[in-house]
Image (tube, coloured by chain):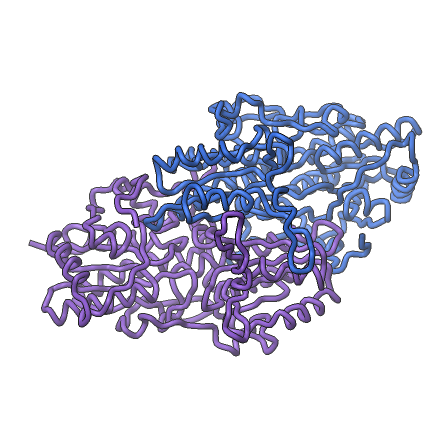
Chain colours: A purple, B blue
Amino acid sequence: MNSNCIVAQSGGPTPIINASLQGVLESSLKSKKIDKVFAARFGIKGLMKDNVFDLTKEDEKQINLLKNTPGSILGSCRYKLKHFNKNTADYKKIFKIFEKYNIEYFFYIGGNDSMDTVDKLSKYARSNKKNINVIGIPKTIDNDLVITDHSPGFGSAAKYIATSVMETALDSRVYQRKNVHLIEVMGRHAGWLAAASALAGQSGLNTPDLIYFPEVVFSTDKFIDDLKKEAEKKDNIVVVISEGIKNDKGEYISASETSKHDQFGHKQMGGAAHSLAPYVKEYIFKRVKVIEFNVLQRACNHSASLIDLKEAYDCGKKAVEIASHKQKTGKTVIIKRISNDPYKSKITYEDVDKIANKEKKIPRDWINKEGNFVTEQAIKYLSPLIKGEPAHKSKNGLPQYSHIKAAATVRHKYEI
Amino acid sequence: MNSNCIVAQSGGPTPIINASLQGVLESSLKSKKIDKVFAARFGIKGLMKDNVFDLTKEDEKQINLLKNTPGSILGSCRYKLKHFNKNTADYKKIFKIFEKYNIEYFFYIGGNDSMDTVDKLSKYARSNKKNINVIGIPKTIDNDLVITDHSPGFGSAAKYIATSVMETALDSRVYQRKNVHLIEVMGRHAGWLAAASALAGQSGLNTPDLIYFPEVVFSTDKFIDDLKKEAEKKDNIVVVISEGIKNDKGEYISASETSKHDQFGHKQMGGAAHSLAPYVKEYIFKRVKVIEFNVLQRACNHSASLIDLKEAYDCGKKAVEIASHKQKTGKTVIIKRISNDPYKSKITYEDVDKIANKEKKIPRDWINKEGNFVTEQAIKYLSPLIKGEPAHKSKNGLPQYSHIKAAATVRHKYEI
């Protein structure tokens, strides 16, 4: 009798995270070594609570739509396992579930924290002689995973950001008046998404004008000076700000608002762009618009990158191959770039402890000396990742998103 | 010798406003009665200042891209002419420009204020025996123009809103925790865009949960009661709020924040959703996310509706026919709906004074009794307008937007 596999998702969603899930499922179904494909809801936390269902029982049509569906369809969690030298309680729960469902392969789609889970579970399995192969499948819009050339999910978020910056720039030029648009994008520790906004300029639109990154110490005085220089040249200025910009004390610019409270005494967290708007009003132009791309940049499957989507799917497929055919454990799938033009990549794998808990930042020389734009090297790296448009499966003018019955609990079973 | 025409854009941009411009241009070039097609920058204000250029000299490739380019490419203005009984100064300036360029036809692409300009200019021309035909071409994402079944631009904004609400809903369900997403959409006086968010529910996603409209008096108590009822049923609540909701005194909910000032003493205008977030935190769930679709909903050509795009183009074409072949003036193009399924419409025209300065609100019986969602009648009306996807002309993963050289002034010539 063959054994089964189980798959789960962890960390923040990406526009194409479910493509990797589809890759795992379709490849597992073809594998002679795997019988059933189980899925856990809400990552490792749901798995521990036996929030598990048989993915192979789902409707084929809905499975085919997975790659076109944003927002971790299995549900997600942010949960870090303690080391099994210190506490084995979680491990016992997890391996009990593995035993219950006759699991031999566990696939975890996640970022650098989730890779820590993969690392610990595979090491625990080995040291306890459990026959379980644990493989990580990378995903993050932040693109902050090391070793892999880039992370599935990033290209689609980057494409959405570049497109939306183009559209914002065109909108900013409509009226005959001076204005500044402050656009805030995600990226708490790494500025890859902010950097991707520079691709908007590749369209010939000459936008954005300035970009600020968590990698460079942020000074409000320097920011105002930069804007003053732009204001000498143009009347409509578009600035992209990473949510993670920090001052020379290492404090988030967004945190400068935390002293404010609403009428009920709740702390009000202002974003970085909202914090900076009053300075722009005072020293540059009175018309300032703050635009936060918010969750849309990680949920925008409707403008996914075809290259990103394909790679995400292939990463899922590769994980099954590594685990079942090659019988490896404690590995993560990674992407290697072979060439830029034409863009070619190869999906391969690496030891997961090389990727877990680490963060890849933008190399300093990919940001200009002023610290307010990217260099040509960054553009060369970023450009291929947003290319291509998937065949959209629209119905009545709206994207068709997958409905997995077992994942469609309106009310969550376990409230935190 | 033939005469020439001039075209301009006015009011807020729409995702497909330039499709009407392309319709005017291509139809004028085919017309035997029209030689040159001039365009004025920044609406009637730019026209008065002779900010005029010859559109026929632009590159054909860039003209072909107009329909796929958001954000009034000619520039826009918000300017109301005084009646010529009171002040003829503006009229004299305008008709001097018409004379200079040998203009016989003036096409103005705009909303209800712009239709007032069309009305006044055509009446002035008639009473002063000037041989100028003035025709309005409707556009507004707000869909608040009377007589016409709907307004070009609305369908594309509606499609973007419905799609983005779907994506927000999927994102809201990722983590196993209770949350409320407050989405704010445009619509100062009419709630058509808020209503369009209900189309997201047609996808089977069961979202949004509540919608609030400017047409219904807003009560914060009632709002909290509505949310409490939803919170009994589900853990992830998505609410769509029109920016124009008002309390029983007729005050904007967003205005309740105006007493706040930033560190420089600038007044801080909070949006309606931001104003309501503290109440939701206090009485419903602690996790509240405010999402403003902001300018993207009027600039989102990348997710345009094909039906909307075609109609916008056809409205431009029709304007030329009315003015030059039928020799009419003081008219506006309008859309008549012939059938819903299959959707059929007819582009025709009406006296412009029937549309100028008026606002079409959502009929009260298209909103439910509770005042927090639409009825089936609204869905039937809205559904066809978002249908179809235009063939996207992408290059390197980004939309190709038109660059009209004469409209590409980085610094505006005339600062207000």
Can you say which quadrant of the picture contains the N terminus of chain B?
A: top right
A117 vs B411, left or right, is left
Confirm whether residue B395 shows in the render: no
Confirm whether residue B346 shows in the render: yes
Query: Is B10 in front, or is A240?
Result: A240
Residue at the image point whose x is 48% and y is 66% from the top:
A192
**Above/below status of B25 relative to B356:** below
Please state the horizontal and vertical placement of residue A248, each as a whole percent of the image: 54, 75
Please state the horizontal and vertical placement of residue A61, each as a whole percent of the image: 30, 41
The quadrant holding residue A317 is bottom left
Residue at the image point whose x is 75% and y is 42% from the top:
B78
The quadrant holding residue B385 is top right
**Above/below status of A351 relative to B86:** below
**Above/below status of B128 relative to B171:** above
A175 vs B181, left or right, is right
Please state the horizontal and vertical placement of residue A344, each as a whole percent of the image: 40, 67
Query: Is A212 in front, or is B326?
Result: A212
Query: Is A303 in front, or is B26?
Result: A303
